[in-house]
Amino acid sequence: MKRIHIIGILVIAVAIMIIMSTASDASVYVPFSEAQARAKEGDDTKVHVVGRLKKDEKGHIVGMKYDPTLDPNYFSFVLVDTNRVEQQVVYYSPKPQDFDRSEQVVITGNMQENVFVADKILLKCPSKYTENEVKVGKTASL
């Protein structure tokens, strides 16, 4: 075999390994009901759940527990998924910055017993600019 053929085969092998490693790490978006069903079947693969924080009529987050003086790596809250199912979520890391202001939350993790243990939390924060504040300026003429 020529040297170029060997290099080509090695490049293809590396590409296949990269594709397989990323495919095995991929997770799917599911509601809490499916995450619970997967846990009952013994499936501990990571899943994504999209939801909103449970808030009272004044806009305060309900069920949020975080005390950095007791344990800075324990944060729990209640998340309501797209099917309006409420679930207690535990995150074994510090509370993310701007968590209180987020509009939507995406968590990655799996169900363990009766709580969802999150490995990652992604926040969709409110827009910095509102439509009323954006002003149309004059364009410079040449």
Image (cartoon, helix red, strand yellow):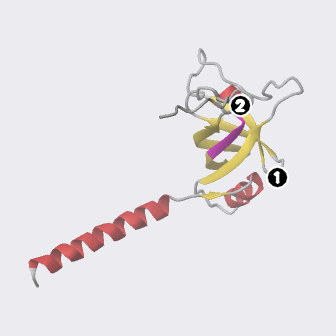
Given residues 70 and 56, the one toward you in this image is 56
Amino acid type, callout 2: Thr
Asked if the stretch drawn in magenta spans residue 104, the answer is: yes
Residue 113 visible to an observer of this rendering: no
Most extreme residue toward the right is 57
Q: Residue at x 65, y 44 (%)?
A: 106
Give percent across and percent down for residue 131. 73, 33
Question: Magenta segment, principal secondary structure?
Answer: strand
Query: Which quarter shows the N terminus?
Result: bottom left
Quarter holding residue 105: top right
Q: Which residue is drawn at 52% across and 31% down?
A: 140
If you read the primary sequence from the N terminus, does the residue marked by circle 1 or circle 2 appear first?
Answer: 1
Q: Which residue is drawn at 77% across and 55% down?
A: 33
Quarter holding residue 16: bottom left
What's drawn in magenta, residue-wise? 103-107
Most extreme residue toward the top is 69
Q: Locate residue 44 relative to residue 9 in the image: left or right.
A: right
Residue topped by disc 2: 130
Given residues 104 and 73, the one toward you in this image is 104
The secondary element bearing badge 1 is classed as loop
| Labels 1, 2: front one | 2
Asked if the stretch drawn in magenta spans residue 142, the answer is: no
Residue topped by disc 1: 83
Given residues 54 and 41, the one toward you in this image is 54
Amino acid type, callout 1: Asn
Give percent across and percent down for residue 107. 63, 44
